[in-house]
Amino acid sequence: MGQGMDPQGFAGPKIVKPLTTEALAAYKAAQDRAGVIYISRIPPGMRPSKVRHLMSSHGEVGRVYLQQEDAKRAYLRRKYTSTKKPHFTEGWVEFKNKKVARSVAEMLNAQPIGGKKGTRWRDDVWTMKYLPKFKWNMLTEQVAHEAAIHTAKLRVELSQSRSEQRDYMRNVELARVLEKRSQRKKEQGEEMVLKPLSRTNKRSSEVEGDVARKRRRDNDDGLDTVLGSIF
């Protein structure tokens, strides 16, 4: 039974053996000999395996890294086009020999990708540059740094969105309270206007009644005077 494997067949923690002095020296020497080229544009639909295949025809290739397109752009592309596969925007290719990397970049830059007739990327053009004194660990540090910046930006945008949402809800609640208060004042104002009008109408009715009664008494007194003078 292999080390790090239990009887059930589940893999345990991997044991990493420290590098010997000779192995570490060989690794550093290999890194010093390697060279990296930068491809500023990846043709649509081209994947890392294809880039490796094309570059391998010019020399021994080490590592290949292609940067995927922005998440928002990828979402819009998948939503409004029929292409659902991931797209890549730029890439880095490591050659085992820096001299080969330099010559490949000088030879292929601004040249058609070529290939058999009818090949998808036959008429696309390479845009690449050799990066002197650039090592692969610099790329990994750069990628990690950019990922951290992207995460920080997302946090800021999310926090800002939450703050805007709270302000919006607060304004909606304030508008609702003000509208309710205005409606209540309006209703109270109508009641205040109606009450004086009702008292005025009642007083007018009383005055009109007194006037009518007085006229009837005057008419009766006048009639008695006329009748008295006749009889």
Image (cartoon, helix red, strand yellow):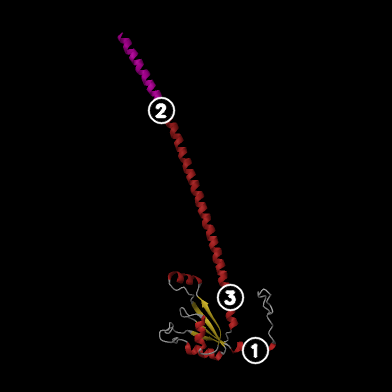
Amino acid type of the residue that numbered disc 3 sits on in the rendered structure: His
x then y, percent, for residue 142 = 57, 78
Magenta part, dominant SS: helix
Question: At x 41% / y 28%, what residue is drawn?
Answer: 205
Please name the residue that numbered disc 2 is placed on: 205
Please say if the residues under marks 1 and 3 sit with CB atoms less than 8 Å apart.
Answer: no
x then y, percent, for residue 181 = 50, 46
Distance from the alpha carbon under mark 2 to that under mark 1:
118 Å
Amino acid type of the residue that numbered disc 2 sits on in the rendered structure: Ser
Distance from the alpha carbon under mark 3 to that under mark 2:
90 Å
> Is residue 210 or residue 178 the one in the foreground?
178
Please say if the residues under marks 3 and 2 sit with CB atoms less than 8 Å apart.
Answer: no
Give the magenta part as a residue range. Answer: 207-231
Badge 1 local density, few (<14 within 10 Å), some, or many (20+)? few
Q: What element carries label 2?
A: helix
Q: What element carries label 1?
A: helix
Question: At x 55% / y 60%, what residue is drawn?
Answer: 163
Question: At x 50% / y 52%, what residue is drawn?
Answer: 175
Question: At x 52% / y 52%, what residue is drawn?
Answer: 173
Magenta region includes residue 1:
no
- Quadrant the N terminus occupies: bottom right
Badge 3 local density, few (<14 within 10 Å), some, or many (20+)? few
Please name the residue that numbered disc 3 is placed on: 145
Of the image marks 3 and 2, the number of the one nearer the N terminus: 3
Pair 2/1: label in front: 1
Pair 1/3: label in front: 1
Please name the residue that numbered disc 1 is placed on: 26
Magenta region includes residue 229:
yes
The tag on residue 141 is: none
Pair 3/2: label in front: 3
Amino acid type of the residue that numbered disc 1 sits on in the rendered structure: Ala
Q: In which quarter of the image is residue 202?
A: top left
